[in-house]
Image: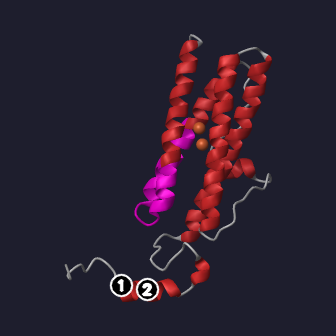
């Protein structure tokens, strides 16, 4: 019981916790490169915002052409992406960073693109492409975080699972349209 060398002893834990308390959730044991993590999370934030905007555009355009079922799906995805953006922004602040909500450069920070699309089919395809980009970039970020920032990693894992559901929804929508 006394031999657990892989755990820091209580005295050291207590002393370390008292140092730099202004860093809040970021303790001395945080082994990730905080600046890089914040930068990656800001790219993820930009991606989510661009996805909100694209899904909103598609929602209103699909509503205009009375594709109500598809429109409802676009709206649901838009709301999910907004939720992701909020989660990510919250985590950036927790890490002592600043969430970048600036419209300037938004599209170049984002991994996914903003494509309006002409037809309903175009819209669904563009959304599917964007989801697939998000899926790959989240997977890479998750690998990067590894065990150095398990909280950010778990957040991204949760978001990744939702993006995979989105991609699956979109494939089914495409199938329903006969292509
Ligand atoms: Fe998302
Ligand atoms: Fe998504």
Q: Answer with left or right where residue 77 lies relative to residue 10.
A: right
Residue 5 visible to the viewer:
yes
Secondary structure beneath dot 1 equals helix
- Label 1 Cα neighbours within 10 Å, binned few <14 / some 14-19 / many ≥20: few
13 w.r.t. 92: above or below: below
Pointer 1 residue Cβ closer than 8 Å to ligand 1: no
* Residue found at x 43% / y 55%: 143
Tell me where residue 95 appears, x and y as whole percent: 59, 68
Instruction: Estimate the x, y position of residue 98 in percent, counting from the top left.
Output: 69, 65
Question: Can residue 179 be seen by looking at this rendering?
Answer: no
How is the model colour-coded?
A: secondary structure
Q: Is residue 134 magenta?
A: yes
Q: Main secondary structure of the magenta part?
A: helix
Say which residue label 1 marks.
10
Q: Classify 10 Å Cα crowding around label 2: few (below 14), some (14-19), many (20 and above).
A: few
Q: Which residue is mark 2?
A: 14
């Amino acid at each position: 019981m006394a031999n657990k060398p892989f755990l820091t002893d209580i005295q050291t834990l207590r002393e370390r916790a008292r140092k730099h308390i202004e860093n809040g959730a970021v303790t001395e044991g945080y082994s990730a490169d905080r600046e890089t993590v914040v930068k990656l999370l800001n790219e993820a934030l930009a991606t989510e915002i661009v996805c909100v905007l694209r899904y909103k555009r598609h929602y209103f355009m699909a509503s205009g052409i009375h594709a109500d079922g598809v429109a409802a799906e676009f709206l649901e995805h838009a709301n999910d992406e907004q939720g992701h953006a909020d989660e990510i922004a919250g985590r950036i602040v927790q890490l002592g960073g600043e969430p970048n909500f600036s419209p300037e450069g938004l599209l170049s920070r984002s991994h996914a693109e903003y494509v309006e699309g002409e037809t309903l089919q175009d819209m669904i395809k563009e959304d599917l492409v964007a989801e697939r980009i998000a899926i790959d970039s989240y997977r890479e970020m998750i690998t990067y975080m590894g065990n150095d920032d398990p909280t950010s990693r778990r957040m991204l894992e949760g978001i990744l699972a939702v993006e995979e559901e989105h991609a699956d929804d979109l494939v089914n929508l495409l199938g329903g349209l006969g292509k």
